[in-house]
Image (spheres, rainbow, N blue to C red):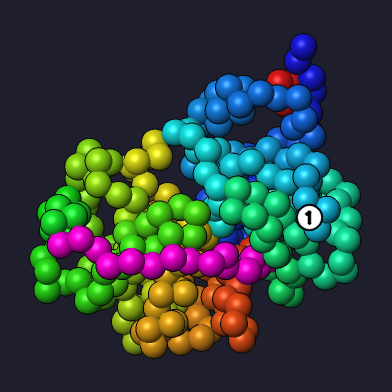
Amino acid sequence: MSTARRFSQLDVFTATPLRGNPLAVVHDAEGLDDATLAAFARWTNLSETTFLLPPTDPAADYRVRIFTPGGELPFAGHPTLGSCQAWLQAGGQPRQPGEVVQQCGVGLVRVRRCGARLAFAAPPCRMAEVEPDRLAAVLQALGLTAGQVLRAQWLDNGPNWLGLLLDSAETVRALRPNHVALASLAKVGVVGPQAAGADTAFEVRGFVAPIGIDEDPVTGSLNASLAQWLIGAGLAPRHYVAAQGSQLGRAGRVHVDCDGPTIWIGGDVATVIEGSVTL
């Protein structure tokens, strides 16, 4: 039997609606089966739709399940910030003042308030070398030459990304990928340094054809793994802002702060729609 449930739609990694990455959130999702969750995520046709549930871990404040149009993810960044904002706006009270603990497929993720922004603690990232044949195929699908790629690394913090450090932000923005070819190869995240004087340090793009869309507007999980990789390798400062979404008409801003052993990934969240959905 269908029930009216609270519904929110938010724009994440922006303070200005329509300039970030939209997220649909269904509150009080108990009783919905997996087929319904997947069908609703396909219906919203957003990069991610989340469903809020009571936690099963006593250390967590709430549990979230994260779906793309192509299936469920164990973790994703913009759904973490957006779901936390929606939970707080609906009256959620964290067990520990100043920090929310989210339960999701990768376990427990801490979220804290950083001024007007929310920021999540980047989960552990497993890294591995990229196979030469796979790298060559990805470069061909992206239209890149080997000389434009400074570093390559597999990055896995729930989602598994093939990360590429390119020679410049201009090269990142100019990419016109073959998404059909990429769909059989990998989710690919590219990052390049901005020119001197820019208001951000890096330009980022995330190509996600394997999960049902071609390019994600602004991607928290990718920026988290890129930050762990680049800061750890001495290729990025401990505090910086990355731009993402410019080629999709967005202006996402991802705030990265390395605080001791923890990397925090922060961004503004703008609420766009509040109401109910019958599921």
Give 107 or 272, whichever is nearer the viewer: 107
Give 267 or 33, whichever is nearer the viewer: 33
Query: What residue is shown at x 55% (from left), y 47% (from top)?
Result: 74
Amino acid type of the residue tagged 1 in the rendering: Ala
Q: Where, by quadrant of the figure, is residue 94 drawn?
A: bottom right
Query: What residue is shown at x 25% (from left), y 41% (from top)?
Result: 184
Horizontal side of residue 277 vs 88, given as left or right: left
Q: Is residue 127 magenta?
A: yes
Query: What residue is shown at x 60% (from left), y 78% (from top)?
Result: 262
Residue 179 x %, y %: 25, 43
Horizontal side of residue 56 vs 195, given as left or right: right
Residue 154 x %, y %: 33, 63
Give 257 or 105, whichever is nearer the viewer: 105
Crowd rating for badge 1 (residues with CA inside 10 Å; few <14, some 14–19, many 20+): many
Please state the extent of the stretch shown in magenta in the rendering: 118-132
Give 179 or 243, whichever is nearer the viewer: 179
- In the figure, 184 relative to 40: above or below? below
Residue 202 x %, y %: 39, 74
Count up the numbered dots: 1
Horizontal side of residue 230 vs 64, given as left or right: left
Query: What residue is shown at x 70% (from left), y 52% (from top)?
Result: 103
Q: Quadrant of the N terminus?
A: top right
Q: Is residue 259 magenta?
A: no
Q: Quadrant of the C terminus?
A: top right
Look at mark 1 in the image and give the residue it sits on.
60
- Secondary element under disc 1, as helix, strand or loop, is loop
- In the figure, 263 relative to 23: above or below? below
Residue 270 visible (yes or no): no
Residue placed furthest toward the top = 1
- In the figure, 233 relative to 276: above or below? below
Residue 231 x %, y %: 44, 82
